[in-house]
Amino acid sequence: MARKSKKQRNAEQRVRQQKVRETARECRRPSRDDIARTLLWQMIVTAEGRRNRTAFLDRLCDEIVAQLVLQGFDRRESEVVFDALADKYTSALPPFRIKRHLDRGPSAAEGQG
């Protein structure tokens, strides 16, 4: 059996990946990025109530930026992005858009409580 061409393998991968996305949407399964975004927001909001808020956020920033630099990102640009998110996330209200594609029907309340 001959090996499939790269073009054919890529086309099949697109179909498989689309099915994965559709299944995740149907199951209302959050992505890794959804969880990471929510975790960062929660950590920043939690820092608001601390006496040592600035020290806590500085340490959090240092740890996150160090990992981003290891991945090849620019240190200063990473700090600028973190600081902008920290400023944006200072409100207790989640700054995230409602995921309209998740159709907030009756089963949306099942996971809450």
Image (cartoon, grey):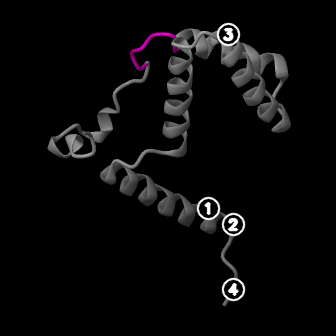
Residue 10 got which mark?
Answer: 1
Q: Residue drawn at (59%, 16%), measured in percent from left and top? A: 85
Q: Are marks 1 and 3 in contact (CB under 8 Å)?
A: no
Verify CB contact (< 8 Å) between mark 2 and mark 1. Answer: yes
Q: CA distance from mark 4 to mark 1?
A: 16 Å
User: Residue shown at 71%/13% (left/top)?
Assistant: 55
- What span is colored magenta in the figure? 89-94
Which part of the image, by quadrant, shows the N terminus?
bottom right
* 21 sits left or right of 69 in the view: left
Amino acid tagged 4: Ala
Kind of residue at badge 1: Asn
Assign the magenta stretch its main secondary structure. Answer: loop
Q: Is residue 12 left or right of residue 99?
A: right
State which tag comes first along the sequence, 2 or 3.
2
Q: Could you tell me which secondary element the residue under label 3 belongs to? A: helix
Looking at marks 4 and 1 on the same chain, the residue that comes earlier in the sequence is marked by: 4
Side (left or right) of 98 relative to 51: left
Q: Quadrant of residue 62?
A: top right
Q: Residues within 10 Å of mark 3 (few under 14, many from 20)?
A: few
Q: Position of residue 86 (x, y in %)?
A: 60, 14
Q: 102 or 19: nearer the eye? A: 102
The residue labelled by disc 3 is 54
Using the image, tell me which numbered label, if any, was put on residue 2: 4
Q: CA distance from mark 2 to mark 1?
A: 6 Å
Write down the residue under mark 2. Answer: 6
Residue positioned most to the front: 51
Q: Residues within 10 Å of mark 2 (few under 14, many from 20)?
A: few
